[in-house]
Amino acid sequence: MELDSIYQNFECRNTEDTSGPRTLNHKQNEGKDENRRGSRCLVLMTVCLGLICVLLLVIIILQHIFITAERESLVSSNKITAEEFNQIINSLQDNYTDLTQKKLELETRVKDLTVEKDQLKNSFSSLSQKKLELETRVKDLTVEKDQLKNSFRSLSQKKLELESKVTSLSDELLRYFFISNESKSWSESRKYCRDRGADLVIINTEEKQRFISSIAKERVWIGLSDIETEGRMIWVDKSTLNRGFWSKDQPNDYNRNEDCVELSPAKDPVNNWFDRPCSEMKKGFCEKN
């Protein structure tokens, strides 16, 4: 483009208006001028061509430098990218290893959970069976409870009836038993009983022993002694003692002066007999014939 413009300018200068009268000398001068201008144009064109060549050479060199730098940059960039790519690959491999390990752990955990699930299922089945058994047992116990309630009511009723009978019998028995209202010796207490159509009580069964002990509230004389024969206890009706309800270490005939027998209810409801001197003052427990 630059050569075309230079050439056009050169042609324009050669085609300037030459109108008007011309002389021969003038034509010769013009010819010389044209030769000089042609030489100048050639020089100019040569210079321009040289400049253009230099410019092209510079452009080529710059392009070469640019391409070389770009290639080095691309190579460097490719190297960095490769290193990063290797790092990414290594990182991914590590992540894959971790994920594989976690997968194995999860699979193991899943297996364990499956086993636990089966165990829980078995436990649940067992508990369900036990629940059913307990429910059945509760029903049975409820039935038994109702039966026991009915039995308890029945027994309570019978108890009331028996208590009523016992009270009646006790009242009836009390008509046969009484305690003297004065403390006297054994002989005088017996006389007190005999004057009232009775005698000192004779106890030959445990039931009667318990009954007398429950009535007596203090020490009382009973109808037993070895006054006639030392060591041979007999009742006031002359019957021999078959079973005694003696307290521990009794009878001991302390000071060889204990021939009459007392009942001491505070000591024991059963084994509460003691031998005492017959002269001691106590109330007598009387029994009607």
Image (tube, rainbow, N blue to C red):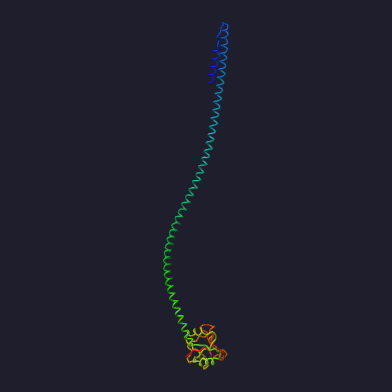
Residue farthest along the top direction in this orientation: 24
Is 60 or 166 nearer to us in this picture? Answer: 166
Number of numbered labels in the structure image: 0
Q: Measured along the vertical axis of the image, is residue 19 above or below residue 124? A: above
Q: Measured along the vertical axis of the image, is residue 227 above or below residue 156? A: below
Quarter-of-image position of residue 133: bottom left
Is 98 or 8 nearer to us in this picture? Answer: 8
* Relative to 37, 135 lies left or right: left
Q: Position of residue 57 (x, y in %)?
A: 55, 24
Q: Position of residue 277 (x, y in %)?
A: 56, 90
Q: Position of residue 246 (x, y in %)?
A: 52, 86
Quarter-of-image position of residue 114: bottom left
Q: Position of residue 16 (x, y in %)?
A: 55, 12
Is 48 or 180 nearer to us in this picture? Answer: 180
Quarter-of-image position of residue 156: bottom left
Residue farthest along the bottom direction in this orientation: 228
